[in-house]
Amino acid sequence: MMDDIENGSMGHYQDRSRSFPDMRTKPYTPLVFKIIMGLNTRVLFILMLLAFGVIFYIGASTSQIIVFVFSVCIFSFLLSIYLTKWVLAKDEGPPEMAQISYAIRDGAEGFFRTQYGTISKMAVLLALVILSIYLLRDTTPQQEAAGVGRVSSAFITVISFLLGALCSGIAGYVGMWVSVRANVRVSSAARRSAREALQVAVRAGGFSALIVVGMAVTGIAILYAAFYVWLGVDSLGAMKVTDLPLLLVGYGFGASFVALFAQLGGGIYTKAADVGADLVGKVEQGIPEDDPRNPAVIADLVGDNVGDCAARGADLFESIAAEIISAMILGGTMAERCKIENPSGFILFPLVVHSFDLVISSVGIFSIRSTREAGIGIEDPMKILQKGYSITIILAVLTFGVSTRWLLYTEQAPSAWLNFALCGLVGIITAYVFVWITQYYTDYKHEPVRTLALASSTGHGTNIIAGVSLGLESTALPVVVISIAIISAFWLGQSSGLLDEAGNPTGGLFGTAVATMGMLSTAAYVLTMDMFGPIADNAGGIVEMSQQPESVREITDVLDAVGNTTKATTKGFAIGSAALASFLLFSAYMDEVATFARVPFKEVDIAVPEVFIGGLLGSMLIFLFSAWACSAVGRTAQEVVNEVRRQFIERPGIMDYQEKPDYGRCVAIVASASLREMIKPGALAIISPIVIGFVFRILGHYVGHPLLGAKVVAAMLMFATVSGILMALFLNTAGGAWDNAKKYIETGALGGKGSDCHKAAVTGDTVGDPFKDTAGPSIHVLIKMLATITLVMAPIFL
């Protein structure tokens, strides 16, 4: 592929024919898809019918609620197929656009194949470690009573872990697959109208979102139903249904494991290429963004897909999986304590909420239609997206009320469902407020970003100072909102009227879980907006590289700027949901420790020196992880900068279009470096909680404190969650604000492109790149992975 690029013609824009060499190589198709595509259509149809029949039979043997969940998920998959066909039916534009798209596609799929091959090997190795630990650990009283021995428990957890990892990987592949095919179609649509380009980008993102959310829900529902039937749950002498959700924690851990390494590897790739391209191309050579003369431009465009699409798909998949499993555990625990006759509604409630999410988000996606108006368009793209989000929010409120009345009504507390519906409303409002706050701090229509852009007029240093202060300030409002949401939901749950055998109110934690579900009840539409960003960014790059008219570039610039805001908004949304989900997982961890230890475990005293040390180590872990992630981007970017400089020096004809840059060399540099650099911070995240818990367990054994290891790990989780939320908010918002301050200047403000003000803004943007697309997103995955790994590894801390 790159040999063809090397030999391409490079005449002046106005003189050369805008054609590119054929960059298409043999497309990569995963083995599973090759097998499916090789089957006879009738055979495939029969196999699908049999698979659906088995799934529905298992679901019907479990609960009618599971049948409902399966039905909605299948409908969403069919809808996503329609969206795929609709997007792929759009033309790819002139040949030069298509050829650039093929180069991006080949680079993204090649890196994805290598990266996920590495992740797969690590996942298998970790699965063997989990298997060994579970074969040696003690079983819980509930498992002993149900006849579930060590071997069964070990294989259940390992199967769950591997399935979670597999589904998370597929979610990432789907995100990347659609983006590398939709980008050129958005570019082509932009030649006709901004609204059509917007619609294509949104529907492409919608396909990915429906698949990701649908897979998260379907995977957990299949595991739940399969274990229910296999273990004979609720039959005489078998496991109780309220204990079943604890067997699913391996699924969440597998999803977190893949999401963390996908986010690290993809984030390092995309930002190293971006920083290298900007520093040499824009600042030193003064050429536009995505200019074909820049040797790092293809690597930069590939990075948008592997970092912002593939990694984000795995990220949100993991968020939804962790939230569903933690809420199911808490629902089962509360139902057991309150002796509710039919606890299935409280356990399966999260699956139903996200099933409705698929329906209402689909309505929001289809509400964005093309009017094919000329030019950039009368309406602001952000306003159009917000209209769709508003529709989704309204429907979410209605369906949440229906879900709570259907599943959470109990004769023991007839009005409890209304309290929980209000908890969901708290979560929905929290999500909306989070979106607004993030937009306020990252959209250049508002004062903070414009103030940051103005700071660029006095130099690079003042731009950096203003960006750091904006990021620090942006942590205040989200923390206040999260605090209000947690306490409001907790007290609404506590006052629901549900009491345990001793007459104590017990609905507080489940109320917080319901609020988290409310916050994520529009997750599919939010992910759609997130996927829109990198697709629009890639479309702009294709337009610039293929030298389309300035009017087309103006359209993609507008969509790109809106995409930067939607990406930042989604990250803020993800951080807020991570805070609530981590709180739930922490509570589930304490319940599991109490179950294994067979003694109450309801509080952690940080005045105990060892416990306080655990908290310090948790906070330190966040800062060290962030440092390693950012330094990984810096080291890789240095390699890219040196390579781009070398090419400009050794090939002087690049600047006047007499020689073609060696794009392949930059792609190879960032691909190999990102795979190498993701290992150290990822290993730190996995090994730290295990080592800390095990060391303090041994210490506790000698000092006569058997729960010391578990308490130290609990303190580590608490401090890491608090520090991680603040750090992620700071990094994501500062990075997004720096990016859009640059975009604001590029609209013509404060001197426009090429001015000293613009160069200072580019410096700020390069500083913010590893903040917002590598360290920041990885941190909120990290804090949830810490919670899930401690749930899975809890026995070794005792």
Image (cartoon, rainbow, N blue to C red):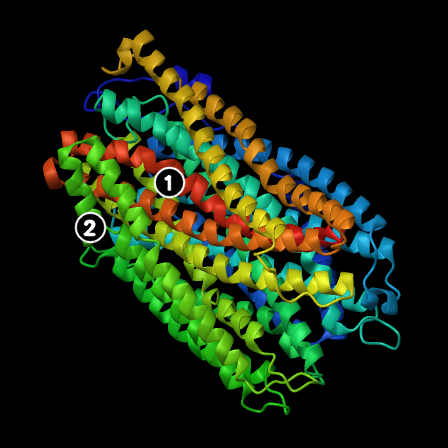
Q: Position of residue 670 (x, y in %)?
A: 47, 26
> Which residue is labeled 2 in the image?
376
Quadrant of residue 483 in the image?
bottom left
* Viewer-side residue, 327 vs 81: 327
Instruction: Tell me which residue sits at (84%, 70%) in the image.
Output: 232
Instruction: Tell me which residue sits at (85%, 72%) in the image.
Output: 238
Identified by mark 1, the residue type is: Val
Q: Element at badge 2?
A: loop
Q: Position of residue 481 (x, y in %)?
A: 38, 65
Residue occupying the far top of the picture: 650
Q: Position of residue 375 (x, y in %)?
A: 18, 49
How packed is label 1: few (under 14 Cα within 10 Å), some, or many (20 or more)?
many
Q: Quick one: label 2 or label 1, which is nearer the N terminus? A: 1
Q: Is residue 115 left or right of residue 543?
A: right
Q: Is residue 766 left or right of residue 589?
A: left
> Which residue is labeled 1 in the image?
184
Q: Element at badge 1?
A: helix
